[in-house]
Image (cartoon, helix red, strand yellow):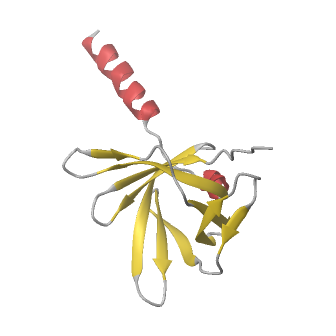
């Protein structure tokens, strides 16, 4: 009987893992705002107001990310600057590889859903994003 309980607990733990699947990657497309940052020492910084948000576009494991500033009429101010990236998978973990003229870095995708995602930086900092919902004041 003890083995049955152990087996049920093991199945429950495996089922609770939030594994990212390649079919989930198109969820990255769209507008995202940072919700909070979790630091390796356990502290967190909450972001309640964001003056700029990220626009991400991905196609066939390649894409770009750019900062945009939402306006109250539902449009966005943006520049032509964009951070290009590629995504690769190794041992079931998807990693975003950025490369600009000035720097190269990568972030592991910890979880990804239609309305949120989390990435882990090389410095073990977790960035938690939520889907941006525009404020339209008429």
Is 137 left or right of 25, judged from the image as shown? right
Rendered location of residue 9, percent (x, y): 34, 22
Rendered location of residue 72, percent (x, y): 71, 51
Toward the left, the furthest residue is: 41
Q: Could you tell me which residue is drawn at 23 percent across and 52 percent down?
A: 40
Q: Quadrant of residue 46?
A: top left
The residue lying toward the viewer, choosing from 123 and 21, is: 123
Q: Quadrant of residue 127?
A: bottom left
Image quadrant occupied by the N terminus:
top left
Q: Could you tell me which residue is drawn at 62 percent across and 48 percent down?
A: 132
The residue lying toward the viewer, choosing from 9 and 46, is: 46
Q: Can residue 59 be seen?
A: no
Q: Quadrant of residue 31?
A: bottom right
Q: Could you tell me which residue is drawn at 50 percent across and 47 percent down?
A: 49
The residue lying toward the viewer, choosing from 43 and 61, is: 43
Is 94 left or right of 138, judged from the image as shown? left
Image quadrant occupied by the C terminus:
top right
Rendered location of residue 50, percent (x, y): 51, 53
Toward the bottom, the furthest residue is: 101
Toward the front, the furthest residue is: 138
Is 128 left or right of 76, judged from the image as shown? left
Residue 102 vertical placement versus 15 (above, below): below
Q: How many marks?
A: 0
């Amino acid at each position: 009987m003890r083995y049955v309980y152990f087996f049920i607990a093991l199945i429950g733990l495996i089922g609770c893992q939030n594994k990212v699947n390649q079919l989930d990657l198109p969820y990255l497309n769209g507008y995202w705002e940072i919700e909070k940052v979790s630091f390796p020492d356990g502290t967190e910084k909450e972001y309640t107001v964001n003056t700029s948000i990220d626009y991400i576009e991905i196609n066939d494991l390649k894409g770009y990310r750019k900062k945009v500033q939402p306006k109250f009429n539902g449009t966005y101010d943006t520049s032509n600057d964009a951070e290009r990236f590629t995504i690769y998978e190794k041992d079931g973990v998807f990693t975003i590889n950025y490369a600009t003229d000035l720097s190269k870095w990568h972030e592991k995708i910890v979880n990804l859903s239609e309305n949120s995602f989390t990435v882990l930086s090389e410095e073990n900092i977790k960035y938690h994003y939520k889907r941006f919902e525009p404020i339209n004041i008429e």
